Amino acid sequence: MKPATNLLVGIPAGISVLVFFIALSSSFGGALVLALLIFVGSLIYFAPSIRAFELEHTNATAIFTLNLALGWLLIPWVIALVWSLSRDKVSEQR
């Protein structure tokens, strides 16, 4: 994995661990399920950004910005996903 991809996967993991320890005071089973749901949900949410950085897309930063700012809406998330999967003319020449 590239360093940017590690960061994008590390952020949801860190948030999940934080939520796990906060929720641990109430019930262990509920905290574990909540942390797992947040981690998986964050990976799905940032899937376009992760894919763009993995493919070394020239517009990976713009895709990440769109994903972060408007990804919670369905249409911008789909646009970011399609954009991240589109072929990049610069990377084809490499």
Image (cartoon, rainbow, N blue to C red):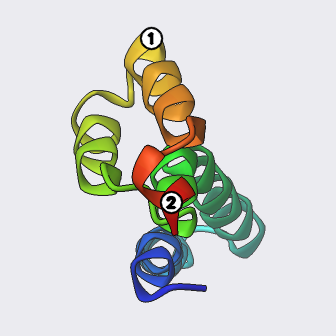
Residue 62 or 11: which is nearer the viewer?
62
| Residue found at the far front of this picture | 93
Q: Position of residue 19 (x, y in %)?
A: 46, 69
Write the residue at 55% across / 75% down: 20
Q: Is residue 17 left or right of residue 30?
A: left
Relative to 84, does residue 40 appear above or below in the rendering? below
Q: Residue type at mark 1: give it.
A: Ile
Q: Position of residue 50 (x, y in %)?
A: 52, 60
Rendered image: mark on residue 93: 2
Q: Nearer the viewer, mark 2 or mark 1?
A: 2
Return the residue at label 1: 75
Relative to 24, does residue 93 appear above or below in the rendering? above
Q: Position of residue 62 (x, y in %)?
A: 23, 45
Residue 42 seen anywhere in this rendered image of the structure: no
Relative to 19, does residue 80 appear above or below in the rendering? above
Mark 1 residue element: helix
Residue 68 or 90: which is nearer the viewer?
90
